[in-house]
C-alpha cells in the first residue's frame, strides 16, 4: 500500500520571513502565495521535496520596486497604468501601453454612439425617425417592444407611471405613487362645444379596484367611454347632468365588457374576479358645475376667495359613509376604523347594482373644482384641508396646481396611486381647446 504524504506548514514566509500559522495558504503580511513553495517538514520525509519549475522561474522575475517612503509630507507620485512598463508573472514583456480608445476588431460595439463623446454629425446620423421612443437613460438607443433600450439595456418606465395633460382651462396629473408597482388610475380631460356656442369642460377620473382583475384596464376603459359619451351628448343639447348620468352608464358597460374577454378568464380561472373601478367626473360650463360619481373618488369645490367656505361635492360609496349616514358613528370614528375604505359601489360586472350619483350646482363666485382619487384625499380629507393645499392661483395655472397636489400626496407617503384634475369655474368663452 502506498503512503500519501501530507505537507506540513512552513515556519516563516520565504518572502518576508513573517511567522506563519498551520494551514496558511498566503502570507498575512505580504500576501505571498505559499502554495507555490515546497512544504517544510518538521521531521524526516521518506521522499525528497522538489520545487516546481514554475515557482523557480517566478522567483527570478525582476519586479519594479515601489517608491521608497520619505519623511516629507509630499505624497508618492501617481502614475497611470499606461505610463508603467509591466512584466507578466512568467517573465515575458507586456505591451508598451494599454489602449483605452478604440476596441480591437471584432469586439462588441454599442448600437448607438456615446452622446458624451460623439460628434454632432454622428449623433444626427444615429437619430431615429420621428415618433421613435428613445431611452430615458442614455437618450440614444431605441426602446424595443419589451420596454428595454437596444443600446444600453436599461428598462424603461411604463407610460402610465406618470401622466400629465393640459388643455388650457383644465389639467390633470396621475402618478403611480411610492408603494404600488403599477398605476391603476386613469383620467380623461377634454372640452365640447354646446349648442349656444359656449364650451363645456370635462374631466373624468377613475381608480381601479386593486383586488379585482385588470384594475388598470378597467379604469382606462371607463374614463375613455365616459369622455366619448359626454362628447356625443353635450353638443346635441342634452342637459349636462343627464349627460353625466349617461356617461356613467356607458363607463359601466365598458368595464362589464372586460369580464367577457378571454384575457380575464385566462388570468383568474377558476376563481374569476371581474375588473372593477370607481368613477368621478365633472362638467363645467359658464353657469353650471355638474358632478357624477360611483365609489369613493371625490370632487371638491375651492373658491378663489379663500375666506369663502370650500365644499366636498360628492358622498362616498363606502362603509364609513354608510355608518355616518345611519347615525351609528360620527365621521372621525368611522374613518378611523380599518373598514372605512371598503367601497360599497363600483363599476364592474360583479357590482350589486349600478347607482350613478349626479349633482348640479350654480356657484356664485369663481373657483376651481378638484376631481381626485383617494390617493390624494387621504392626505387632505376635509374640504378645508383641500383648500389649504390648493395653490392660490389654481384657476390661472391648473396644471401647476395638479402637480402641486400630486406632490403633496407623494410627500405624505404616496401609499396609493394619485390622480388629480383641476377645472376652473366658470369656463371662459375660448374654452379649453379640443379633445
Image (cartoon, grey):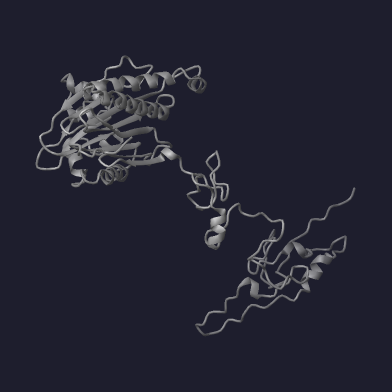
Most distant residue in the right direction: 1
Which residue lies at the image location 39% right of the left edge and 32% below the top edge? 184
Q: Tell which of 219 and 331 is nearer to you.
A: 219
Q: Tell which of 43 and 96 is nearer to you.
A: 96
Q: Is residue 182 left or right of residue 81?
A: left
Which residue lies at the image location 40% right of the left edge and 27% below the top edge? 215
Location of residue 290 with respect to 53 vertically, above or below? above
Q: Tell which of 324 and 200 is nearer to you.
A: 200
Question: Quadrant of the rendered structure where residue 225 is?
Answer: top left
Find residue 221 and report its horizontal and vertical position in percent: 39, 26
Find residue 292 and report its horizontal and vertical position in percent: 24, 25
Q: Is residue 357 left or right of residue 264?
A: left
Which residue lies at the image location 11% right of the left edge and 37% below the top edge? 365
Location of residue 13 with respect to 320 vertically, above or below? below
Most distant residue in the top direction: 353
Find residue 109 and report its horizontal and vertical position in percent: 64, 55
Amino acid at each position: 500500500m502506498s503512503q500519501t504524504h501530507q505537507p506540513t506548514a512552513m515556519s516563516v514566509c520565504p518572502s518576508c520571513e513573517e511567522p506563519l500559522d498551520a494551514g496558511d495558504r498566503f502570507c498575512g503580511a505580504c500576501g505571498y502565495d505559499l502554495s507555490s513553495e515546497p512544504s517544510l517538514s518538521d521531521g524526516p520525509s521518506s521522499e525528497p521535496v522538489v520545487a516546481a519549475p514554475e515557482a523557480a522561474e517566478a522567483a527570478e522575475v525582476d519586479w519594479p520596486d515601489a517608491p521608497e517612503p520619505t519623511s516629507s509630507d509630499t505624497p508618492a507620485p501617481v502614475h497611470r497604468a499606461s505610463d508603467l512598463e509591466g512584466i507578466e508573472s512568467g517573465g515575458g514583456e507586456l505591451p508598451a501601453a494599454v489602449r483605452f480608445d478604440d476596441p480591437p476588431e471584432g469586439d462588441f460595439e454599442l448600437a448607438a454612439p456615446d452622446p458624451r463623446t460623439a460628434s454632432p454629425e454622428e449623433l444626427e446620423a444615429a437619430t431615429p425617425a420621428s415618433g421613435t421612443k428613445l431611452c430615458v437613460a442614455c437618450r440614444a438607443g431605441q426602446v424595443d417592444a419589451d420596454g428595454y433600450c437596444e443600446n444600453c439595456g436599461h428598462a424603461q418606465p411604463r407610460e402610465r407611471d406618470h401622466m400629465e395633460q393640459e388643455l388650457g382651462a383644465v389639467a390633470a396629473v396621475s402618478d403611480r405613487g411610492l408603494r404600488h408597482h403599477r398605476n391603476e388610475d386613469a383620467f380623461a380631460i377634454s372640452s365640447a362645444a354646446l349648442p349656444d356656442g359656449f364650451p363645456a369642460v370635462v374631466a373624468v377620473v377613475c381608480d381601479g379596484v386593486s383586488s379585482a382583475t385588470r384594475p388598470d384596464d378597467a379604469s382606462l376603459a371607463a374614463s375613455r367611454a365616459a369622455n366619448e359619451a359626454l362628447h356625443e351628448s353635450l353638443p346635441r343639447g342634452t342637459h349636462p347632468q343627464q349627460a353625466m348620468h349617461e356617461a356613467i352608464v356607458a363607463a359601466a358597460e365598458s368595464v362589464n365588457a372586460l369580464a367577457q374577454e378571454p384575457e380575464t378568464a385566462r388570468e383568474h380561472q377558476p376563481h374569476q374576479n371581474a375588473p372593477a373601478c370607481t368613477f368621478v367626473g365633472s362638467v363645467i360650463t359658464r353657469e353650471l358645475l355638474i358632478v357624477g360619481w360611483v365609489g369613493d373618488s371625490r370632487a371638491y369645490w375651492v373658491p378663489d376667495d379663500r375666506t369663502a367656505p370650500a365644499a366636498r361635492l360628492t358622498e362616498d360609496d363606502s362603509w364609513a359613509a354608510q355608518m355616518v349616514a345611519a347615525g351609528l358613528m360620527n365621521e372621525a370614528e368611522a374613518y378611523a376604523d380599518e373598514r372605512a375604505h371598503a367601497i360599497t359601489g363600483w363599476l364592474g360586472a360583479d357590482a350589486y347594482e349600478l347607482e350613478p350619483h349626479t349633482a348640479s350646482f350654480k356657484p356664485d363666485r369663481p373657483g376651481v373644482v378638484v376631481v381626485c382619487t383617494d390617493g390624494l384625499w387621504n392626505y387632505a380629507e376635509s374640504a378645508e384641508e383641500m383648500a389649504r393645499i390648493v395653490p392660490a392661483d389654481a384657476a390661472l395655472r391648473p396644471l401647476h396646481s395638479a402637480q402641486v397636489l400630486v406632490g403633496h400626496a407623494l410627500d405624505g407617503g404616496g401609499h396609493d396611486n394619485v390622480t388629480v384634475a383641476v377645472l376652473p369655474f366658470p369656463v371662459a368663452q375660448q374654452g379649453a381647446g379640443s379633445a
